[in-house]
C-alpha cells in the first residue's frame, strides 16, 4: 500500500496495568481451549486457523469450545470469571474496542515484551503500518487481522444514481436531509463500520486534533448531531445495518471493504450495490487482536502462545482472504501470492477494478488509542445516540 501513513497520537501510558508475568509451561497432556470472540474474527478466518492448529497438535489441544459475544460484553465476561477465581477463557479475539475495554480494567497478560520469545519475530511479518497498529496494543494483544478498509459509502444502485452518490461529508448531510430516514450508520461501539465513519470525519472535516475526541472534534460532533436529525435509528450492530440496507429500508450507508465484499457474496446486498470513496479519502486502519486473560494456567498460556504464533503465519492468514478482507496481518500474505482460490474470490467479489486504486490513492491513518476510543464511544452516545429522532 503506497498511501501515506499518519498517526493519531502516541498510545496511552497504561500505568494501571500490572507487570504480572507468567512462565508458560508445556502441558503433560492435551488441554481444552475456550475461545471468546467479540469482533467477528472467528467467521473472518480465525476459526479455520484455530481448527487447523488443533488438528495438527493433538498433543496440545484436546478440544476447542467457541463462544461469541458483543464487543461491549467481553470485558464483563472475563472480569466475572476473574472475580470468581476461575478463568475458563483461554484466548480473547476482538478489535481495538475489546482491547481497550480489557486494558482499562487490567484484565490481560502482557505478551509482546514478556512472552516475546514464544512469538514470531514481528519485524518479519509486519510493515510500518501494521507495526503501528500492533504498537497500539501496548503488548497486550497480537495483531491477527489487518484491515485499512473504511469508511466508504455504499448506495442502492436502483435508487441512487452513481453521479449523485455523496462523496463528501457535506454532500452526505445534504442527501440525508433530502431523504430523511434513508441514511444511517451502526452504533460505533458495536460496529467496525460505525467506528471507521466517526474516526474519519475529523480528518475529512478539518478538525483541530483527530486524535482527541474530547478536545479536538468540535466540527465532528456538530456535524454528527446535525446528521442525526435525519436518522430514524442507529442499528445496534453492523449485521443489522447490513440487513436494513439490503432490504431497502436504507439507501445510503457508510461501510467498510470487508462488509461490502461479504454482504454481496452471501446475498444480503445486491451484487450491483454501488460504492464510492470520499474525496480526500481517509482510510482508518483496523484489525483484530488475540489476547490472553489473566488467570489462565501456565499450561494454557503455553498453548495459547503456540496457537497465536500459528494464527499469524502465512498459511493461516491466507484463509482470511476468502472471507471479505483484502489485506492480512502478515505482510507476506497477499491476494497475489495466495493461490487460485483467493485470486478467483477477489476477481468475483473484491472489485479489483476499484479497491487497489482506491487504497493507493487514499491516506491511511491509525485508529484512536483504546482509551481515546472509549471516550469517543461515550461522547457519541451522549451527544448523538441518545438524541436519535423517532
Image (tube, rainbow, N blue to C red):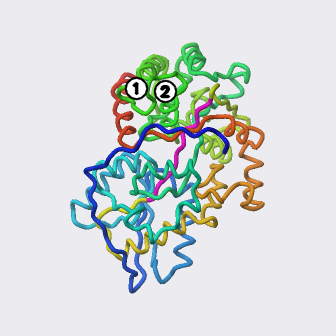
Q: How crowded is mark 2: few (under 14 residues within 10 Å), some or many (20 or more)?
A: many
Q: Is residue 325 left or right of residue 307?
A: right
> Residue 367 in the image: x percent, y percent?
48, 40
Residue at the spot x=57%, y=14% of the render?
174
Q: What element carries label 1?
A: loop
Q: Is the magenta stretch mostly helix, strand or loop?
A: strand
> Residue 199 in the image: x percent, y percent?
48, 33
Residue 389 visible in rendering? no
Which label sits on residue 202?
2
> Residue 221 in the image: x percent, y percent?
42, 22
Q: Mark 1 points at which residue?
A: 216
In depth, the one of 377 and 267 nearer the eye is: 377
- Residue 285 lies in the magenta-colored region: yes
Distance from Cα at disc 1 to Cα at disc 2: 8 Å
Residue 334 drawn above or below residue 242: below
Residue at the spot x=71%, y=28% of the render?
157
Residue at the spot x=73%, y=24% of the render?
162
Q: What element carries label 2?
A: helix
Residue 61 visible in rendering? yes
> Residue 138 in the image: x percent, y percent?
39, 53
Answer whether labels 1 and 2 touch (C-beta < 8 Å): yes
Q: Which segment did they paint magenta? A: 281-290
Classify the position of the C terminus by image quarter.
top left
Q: In this view, does 363 lie to the left or right of 211?
A: right
Amino acid at each position: 500500500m503506497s498511501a501515506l501513513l499518519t498517526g493519531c497520537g502516541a498510545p496511552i501510558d497504561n500505568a494501571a496495568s500490572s507487570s504480572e508475568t507468567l512462565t508458560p509451561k508445556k502441558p503433560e497432556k492435551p488441554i481444552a481451549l475456550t475461545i471468546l470472540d467479540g469482533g467477528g474474527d472467528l467467521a473472518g478466518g480465525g476459526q479455520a486457523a484455530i481448527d487447523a492448529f488443533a488438528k495438527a497438535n493433538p498433543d496440545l489441544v484436546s478440544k476447542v469450545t467457541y463462544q461469541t459475544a458483543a464487543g461491549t460484553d467481553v470485558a464483563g465476561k472475563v472480569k466475572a470469571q476473574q472475580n470468581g477465581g476461575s478463568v475458563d477463557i483461554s484466548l480473547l479475539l476482538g478489535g481495538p474496542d475489546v482491547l481497550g475495554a480489557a486494558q482499562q480494567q487490567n484484565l490481560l497478560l502482557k505478551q509482546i515484551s514478556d512472552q516475546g520469545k514464544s512469538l514470531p519475530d514481528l519485524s518479519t511479518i509486519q510493515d510500518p503500518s501494521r507495526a503501528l497498529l500492533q504498537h497500539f496494543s501496548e503488548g497486550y494483544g497480537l495483531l491477527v487481522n489487518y484491515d485499512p478498509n473504511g469508511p466508504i459509502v455504499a448506495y442502492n444502485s436502483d435508487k441512487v444514481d452513481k453521479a449523485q452518490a455523496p462523496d463528501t461529508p457535506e454532500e452526505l448531510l445534504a442527501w440525508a436531509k433530502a431523504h430523511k430516514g434513508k441514511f444511517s450508520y451502526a452504533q460505533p461501539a458495536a460496529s467496525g463500520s460505525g467506528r471507521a465513519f466517526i474516526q474519519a470525519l475529523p480528518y475529512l472535516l478539518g478538525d483541530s486534533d483527530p486524535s482527541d475526541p474530547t478536545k479536538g472534534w468540535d466540527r465532528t460532533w456538530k456535524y454528527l448531531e446535525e446528521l442525526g436529525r435525519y436518522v430514524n435509528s442507529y442499528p445496534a450492530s453492523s449485521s443489522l445495518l447490513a440487513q436494513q440496507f439490503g432490504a431497502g429500508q436504507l439507501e445510503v450507508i457508510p461501510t467498510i471493504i470487508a462488509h461490502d465484499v461479504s454482504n454481496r457474496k452471501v446475498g444480503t446486498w445486491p451484487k450491483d450495490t454501488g460504492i464510492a470513496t470520499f474525496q480526500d479519502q481517509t482510510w482508518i486502519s483496523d484489525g483484530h487482536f488475540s489476547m490472553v486473560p489473566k488467570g489462565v494456567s501456565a499450561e494454557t498460556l503455553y498453548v495459547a502462545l503456540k496457537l497465536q504464533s500459528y494464527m499469524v503465519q502465512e498459511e493461516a492468514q491466507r484463509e482470511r482472504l476468502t472471507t471479505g478482507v483484502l489485506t492480512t496481518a502478515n505482510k507476506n500474505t497477499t491476494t497475489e501470492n495466495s493461490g487460485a482460490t483467493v485470486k478467483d474470490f477477489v476477481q468475483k467479489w473484491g472489485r479489483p477494478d476499484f479497491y487497489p486504486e482506491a487504497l493507493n490513492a487514499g491516506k491511511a491513518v491509525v485508529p484512536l488509542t483504546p482509551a481515546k476510543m472509549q471516550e469517543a464511544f461515550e461522547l457519541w452516545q451522549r451527544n448523538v445516540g441518545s438524541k436519535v429522532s423517532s
